[in-house]
Image (tube, rainbow, N blue to C red):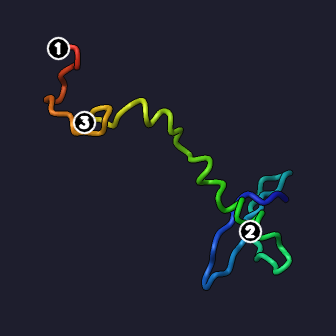
């Protein structure tokens, strides 16, 4: 079993989420008083350090209807920027 995430249940009860290295099954276990708090915090911060959407791709291509600097695009829909 390898720890993959941390979650909080109820009143400040931290739970570790483990994945079986053989079959991939997920299990939740309560944290213990002797668990390394620094490692738990690192595990909790992991999703912030590796977001599911690559940030470089977000920065290089604006959302539809917006310019690259984040302002609403004033051109009518369907017009190409080269015209």
Q: Identify the element where label 2 is drawn.
A: strand
Say whether disc 2 or disc 3 marks the residue closer to the N-terminus: 2
Label at residue 34: none
Label at residue 83: 1
Say whether disc 2 or disc 1 marks the residue closer to the N-terminus: 2
Q: Is residue 45 left or right of residue 59?
A: right
Residue at image mark 3: 65
Q: Is residue 17 left or right of residue 67?
A: right
Image location (x, y in percent) of residue 5: 70, 61
Image location (x, y in percent) of residue 79: 18, 22
Write the residue at 31% across / 35% down: 69
Q: Quadrant of residue 37?
A: bottom right
Q: CA distance from mark 2 to mark 3?
A: 42 Å
Write the residue at 63% across / 81% down: 12
Q: Quadrant of the image for the C terminus?
A: top left
Q: Quadrant of residue 34?
A: bottom right
Residue at image mark 2: 16
Around disc 3, counting alpha carbons within 10 Å, would you say few (fewer than 14), some (14 to 19), or many (20 or more)? Answer: few
Q: Quadrant of residue 33?
A: bottom right
């Amino acid at each position: 079993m390898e720890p993959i995430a941390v979650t909080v249940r109820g009143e400040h009860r931290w739970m570790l989420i483990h994945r079986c290295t053989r079959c991939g099954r997920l299990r939740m276990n309560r944290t213990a008083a002797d668990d390394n708090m620094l490692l738990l915090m690192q595990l909790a911060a992991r999703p912030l350090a590796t977001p599911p959407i690559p940030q470089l791709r977000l920065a290089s291509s604006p959302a539809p209807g917006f310019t690259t600097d984040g302002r609403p695009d004033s051109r009518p829909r369907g017009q190409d920027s080269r015209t």
